[in-house]
Structures are given as structure tokens and as C-alpha cells.
Image (cartoon, rainbow, N blue to C red):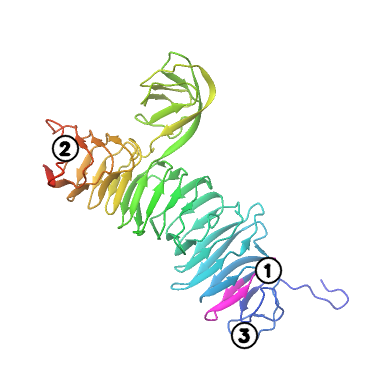
Amino acid sequence: MLAFGLTVADAATKYWGGAGVWTTASAWSLTSGGTLDQTWVANDDAVFDVANSTITGATTTFKSITANQNVTVTAGGTLDTAGTVATVTVASGMTLNTAGQALATTAGTGFIKSGAGTWISANGGAFPGGFVLNAGTIGIGGVNAMGVGALTINGGTISNSPGTTARALTGKYTSVTIGGDFAFEGAANLTFNSTNALGGVTRNITNNNTAASVVLNGPFVNGGLNLAGPGNWTIAPTFARTATATAGSSVITMADTTYLMVGQAISVTGASLTTGSVITSITPNTSITTSGTATNAVASAATTITGSAHSGGTTISGGLVRAGNDFAFGSGDITLNGGKLGTSTGVTITNNITLLADGDIANANNMTLSGVISGNQALTHSTTAALTLSGARHASAWRHQPARQRQARHG
């Protein structure tokens, strides 16, 4: 609308070509390489296509960011998406480094990372609208780099970089949906504890972090895993429920039995369940039966379920995968296809094991394998910690002799 000779500027795609602050007058153009005669308008789309661009942030809103060249953002003000989920696209071989630039925590604020390039973020505030990784790399410069709420991983790489600081992303995500194959990289531990939905298929997850470990303390559900790459893993899933126990009974009342599986360990706060109790049967969303009994009656008590919840099997194709509890690999088979199976605590693994390639048991703690081990490949025990093979095809327990490396062949 026109009034007194004034016009209201509409949001548009703006190309950065100047220096200074995001909102500097006449620092943008309407075309790539065009005349710098435009000032930023709230909800514009930002495009950076000048090599090694630099810019200082400001308190303003944007609709999307496209980095066709390397871009370094110096922190200033708060960048806001006006409560929407904005797409950040970085071209192959390029890096958008927003470092400590503040991102709004307004309800609905979230991001979609697209393009084969890298976005590094160390923002201090936790935006609540979720994060989607479609392609390229997200550099976890701080624990809020992917915000809070729903995390969706459709591809790309999660990198604990820059630097060598361990990042614990525990309690950040209400859900993690794994919609495609992806990778980890970096030089320090990266820890998650959310429930990971696999979408009913086997997902390939590659760990290229050879300097530290990826620690996954949440259960996987609805699918299978192929863990690849040279990096190390610790798999120690647990999750919480609420339960009511009756003294002297093995039946535990539980209104939500989602992701529970026979064989998972259970602990009910205050109930003093028999040590080592596991789930033996489940009546969906009503109750479970355990291998032990409760000493004390408790109502609506915090309950810890220990173990993963996927039944599609786990393939170890590279690196060292450490089991952090007895049910770390769910109810499916374990397939050794070139990697190592280890421990981060003493465990008894009941899963059947198939050898597609020579396998290595590299346990740092006492370990019992009670499932069937099959496959005409060599199984090597390369550590001095006790290893007991008690499943079918084993007439007696086999233990490593520290003075020499032994192999067991199954076929």
C-alpha cells in the first residue's frame, strides 16, 4: 500500500557482498554479483556466493540461508526464523561457520540442514523446533548445535568438531528418527541417550571417529543396525518407565510397555526386585512378569529398563563395538563381518552370533557368550579378560590363554 510517497519493502532473496553487520545498509544485492544497493529486510532469504565471506550477526529474522562459498559469522545479536523451520544449505566443499552466533529459542524455531557442505554451530540457546539432517555435515561446536525436541537424520554426517571437547547430548531429544544411512566423525566422545527409531529397515551407521568413541545410551527400535567404519562404539541402552509393584510378586503393573522386550533387565525404585531380574513376559500396556520378586510394595515408581529394543539384528562391520549391558543388541542376531566385539562392563550376551568374516572378541571385562556361534570363520580372543563360550556347539567353556592367542573355528 502507498501512503505519503512511502513503500513497504517485501521480503526477497538477498545476496551478501559487503562487509560489516548483517543489517548494514546497502550491503546486499538482488542478484549474484549485482549492485550492493539493498538493505536486509526481515524474513529475507540469504545467499552467500562471494569467496570467503565474512559477516557479523544481528537481531533480525531470516527465511533461509544458502552458502555457496565459505562463510564465517561473527556473533552479534540473535538470528531468528520467526518461529518457523528454516533450511540451511551449504554447497559441497564449503563451510558455513556460525560459531557462537545466537539463534532464537522462540517456539517453532528449527532447522533443516541440506547440501553436501558443512555447517558448524556452537549457539548457546537450545532452539525447540527440531533439527533435520538431510545431507552434508553438522559440526557440533556445542551441545545445542542441533537444538532440542525432535531430531531426524536422513543422511549426512554428525561431527564432534571443531576441537577435542567431548559432547554429551543427553536429554536433548524427545525422539530420534533415523530415516537413512549416516556417519559420525570427530576427535572426541559424542554421547546420545534418546530412543532411536530405525523405520523398520536396517540402517548403516559409519563411525569415522578414531580418536574417541560414539556412546549410544538410548534403545534402538523397529529395525536393524550395521555398524561400520574404523571408530569405536559403546552401546549401553536404557530407558525409563513408571511401574507399580506388589511385595512378594513377580508381576509388575505398567501402563506403557512400548519398546519392552523379553530379556531386558528391570529395576523398580524402592521395590528391591531380586538382583538380576529380567522381563520374562509382557501383557501389552498392562503388566510384565519378571524373573525375580519384589520385596517392597511401591506405586508409580521410577523404573529403569536396561537394553535395546530392536529385533532386526546388529552387524559389526568395523571398529570396536563395546556392549554396555547384557541386552545391548536387542533380540536379534549379532553378525561379525570384520569388526570387533568388546565390553565396557561385565556382560552375558545371549544373542546368536554369525561369523561372515574372521571375528575378534576384544573384551575389557569378563564376558559370556551364551548364544549359538556359527559360520566357517575364525573367532579370535585378543585380550586377557575372561571369555566364556557357553552356547550350543561348545562342549565346555573356552577361555583365552594369556600367553598365546587362540582361535575357535565354527562350521
Which numbered disc covers residue 34?
A: 3
Spot occupied by residue 5 in the image (x, y as percentages of width and height):
86, 78
User: How crowded is the residue under tag 1: few (<14 C-alpha within 10 Å), some, or many (20+)?
Assistant: some
Three-letter code, disc 1: Ala
Percent position (x, y) of residue 32?
58, 82
Residue stretch rendered in magenta on the structure? 46-60
Structural crowding at the residue carrying mark 2, measured as other residues with C-alpha within 10 Å and reported as few (<14), some (14–19) or many (≥20):
some
Left-right relation of 197 to 280: right
Answer with mark 2 or mark 3, whichever residue precedes in sequence: 3
Q: CB under 8 Å between callouts 2 and 1?
A: no
Secondary structure under tag 1 reads loop
- The answer for how far apart the CA atoms under marks 2 and 1 are is 64 Å
Tell me if residue 52 is in the magenta stretch: yes
Residue 1 left/right relative to 254 = right
Residue at image location 34% in from the left, 36% down from the top: 327
Would residue 230 be visible to someone looking at this image?
Answer: yes
The part of the image, by quadrant, that contains residue 186 is: bottom left
Question: Identity of the amino acid at label 3?
Answer: Gly
Decide which of tag 1 and tag 3 comes sooner along the chain. Answer: 3
- Residue located beneath label 1 in the image: 58
